[in-house]
Amino acid sequence: MRVFLSTVVRGAPVEKAGELISLDWEKKQVLRRMPIYPSNPAVDDRNARGGCRGGRGITLLPNELFVANYHSLLGFDFNLNPTRTITNHNFAGLHEIKLVKDGIWTSSTALGCVQKVSFDGVARESWWAHDDPLVQRNFSVAPLKIDKTRDNRLGYMEDGSKVHLNNVEVAGDAVYVCFNNHGAIIRLFPTQVISSDPALKGCHNGLVTGDGEFIINDSHNHTVVVLDLESGRVNRRIDLAQFPPVAALMKVRRCRDISFRVRLENFVRRQRVARPLFTRGMCRLDATRILVGVSPASVLELDYQQGRLLGLCQLSGSANECVHGLEAAPSVDFPFSIS
């Protein structure tokens, strides 16, 4: 099995703050690494905790993959040779992405919107959280004044959306998004709140299973949460720290590529740049297995039905380097092997 993952190195200079990595899963061997950072336009971001840094969501096409950076989808072949770039004037703070037959669904966190774009970046469908009356009413969200016709890629890094819409998932005709700041899962077209739980604040990477469940990462509590898709009730939780090989990662405190200025600023603010076992990145392999990413950058293979750890590959010894995007071949979304 070939695994593709992206990383974010919190606190690092933008040009050193993330990679796209190709991994032979059976051998636990890195095949290639490519730096990932936003350029054209370049981004000057002082938000050391993440901001514009690193790679985000990944999706696989028959002969090509795309990984998101802050404002673009970067194309590569399966040997990680660059192919092309897709961008759109409303790509801002891209997080997760999802391939469909006629394009790619993207989540622009800074703007609180999801868009389905064609393979040349033209928007075909969109939904804007701050414009939705149900979202405004249920989550006390104020309208966000955005000129949707202008180039917004760098315009809302400081004062954009506060719902932190960070995920888009498609299952059949249904589109789902997650609000990180509200612990909410929402089905679109029409808008329906599936679940809203303050205990799930920090949620990320929502995926629909084949048997009516929804799996998310609880990033702050190193937990994988499995919910009933219709009722929104939690069916089970998998605390990753219960597994001794994963718990060992919690002892990692070293951070790399953080300047003295950033360390001093965060000391004064009493703010942590990073924490071990920050949980982000998910890929569904089949009816029982998923891949999950954590910090320091490591990939876990789980049986999410029985709550068992099946495998682990640690790629970093730095607590501030975390997995963000994850895809595999074969997987549910890409049921073909890559030699």
Image: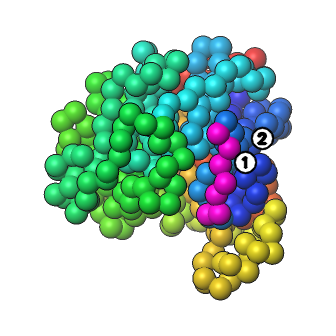
Question: Which residue sits at x=71%, y=19%?
Answer: 83
Magenta stretch encompasses residue 272: no
Q: Which residues are magenta?
A: 41-47
Residues packed near mark 2 inside 10 Å, few (<14), some (14 to 19) or many (20 plus): some
**Quadrant for the N terminus in the image:** top right
- Which badge, 2 or 1, comes first in the chain's sequence? 1
Above or below, comparing residue 334 to residue 90 in the picture: above
Mark 1 — residue? 18
Under tag 2, what secondary structure? strand
For mark 1, does the 10 Å Cα neighbourhood hold few (<14), some (14 to 19), or many (20 or more) residues? many
Could you tell me residue 41's position as x and y percent?
64, 39
In this orientation, does residue 277 appear? no
Q: Quadrant of the C terminus?
A: top right
Dot 2 amino acid type = Pro
**Residue at the spot 20% in from the left edge and 55% down from the top edge:** 136
Q: Position of residue 182 (x, y in %)?
A: 34, 61
| Element assignment for label 1 | loop
Name the residue: 44% across, 21% down: 122
- Side of 214 relative to 78 (left or right): left
In the picture, the disc for residue 151 is none
Task: Name the residue type under label 1.
Answer: Gly
Q: Are marks 2 and 1 in contact (CB under 8 Å)?
A: yes
Q: Residue 35: which disc?
A: 2
Residue 174 in the image: above or below residue 130: above
Q: Main SS of the magenta segment?
A: loop
C-alpha span from label 2 to label 1 = 6 Å
